[in-house]
Image (tube, helix red, strand yellow):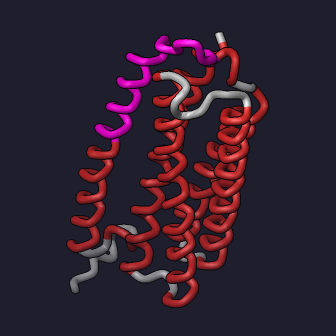
Amino acid sequence: MKIDNSLPLEYSTEENRLKILGFWIFLGAEIALFATLFATYFTLVNRTGNGPIGGDIFEVTPVLIETILLLTSSFTIGLGINAMRHGSKNAMMVFFIITLALGAGFLGTEIFEFKHYVHIGAGLQVSAFTSILLTLLGTHGAHVTLGLFWGTFIVLQVKKRGLTPETTNKAFIYSLYWHFLDVVWIFIFSFVYLKGMM
């Protein structure tokens, strides 16, 4: 394995560069998935039948908490990658653990929000609107859940093996995934919650 020392460690081998390119292609498929869900949401948003509309069920506080937690986690993972590039294994691990804690807080708030929706009569089978809303939010939440497990394994690998071309590549790819989830959330916050509250 030939290492190019002029590049950051996560890009330092041809295999690593190909893995990063491959992950960008994967993210293209994820964009298509969420674009389909958003298109379906925009098509069904007014199909409420006898069920509630967004303004009836959306609450500002949990949405703001979720947004602050997830956007802050995007900042901390960026700090983690910066620490990784400076060779600081401990700082990188601390920032990744903070990111995971923020992600877990987001997920806990989202679960609370789902329980609230069901409690007030906005379940999956109430209307087309509630069905696609919960599907969109649930798909994003499932991605965050996967991200929490994935990030935990990254931290454990870095703790055990240190900052190697392999572990830094995995950590960098993971950071791309996490930033992607934050971008999706910005769209959810803007076009689902804010628009639904107006």
Residue at 49% x, 68% y is: 150
Q: Is residue 192 above or below residue 82?
A: above
Residue 102 visible in image: yes
* Residue 65 x %, y %: 74, 39
Examine the residues drawn in magenta and state their main secondary structure. helix
Q: Is residue 32 above or below residue 40?
A: below
* Residue 41 x %, y %: 43, 24
Q: Nearer the viewer, residue 178 or 82?
A: 178
Q: Nearer the viewer, residue 178 or 55?
A: 55
The quarter in which the C terminus is drawn is top right
Instruction: Determine the residue located farthest toward the bottom in the rendered image.
Output: 160
**Residue 49 included in the magenta stretch of the image:** yes
Residue 82 visible in image: no
Q: Nearer the viewer, residue 190 or 71?
A: 190
**Residue 36 included in the magenta stretch of the image:** yes
* Residue 125 x %, y %: 51, 31
Q: Kindly indicate the quadrant of the structure image that contains residue 90.
A: bottom right
Stretch in magenta? 31-54
Residue at 70% x, 52% y is: 108
- In this rendering, position of residue 70 left or right of residue 161: right
* Residue 177 x %, y %: 43, 54
- In this rendering, position of residue 150 left or right of residue 114: left
Residue at 54% x, 48% y is: 141
Q: Is residue 123 above or below residue 144?
A: above
Q: Is residue 67 above or below residue 178?
A: above
Instruction: Determine the residue located farthest toward the right in the rendered image.
Output: 61
Residue at 48% x, 17% y is: 45
The quarter in which the N terminus is drawn is bottom left
Q: Kindly indicate the quadrant of the structure image that contains residue 119.
A: top right
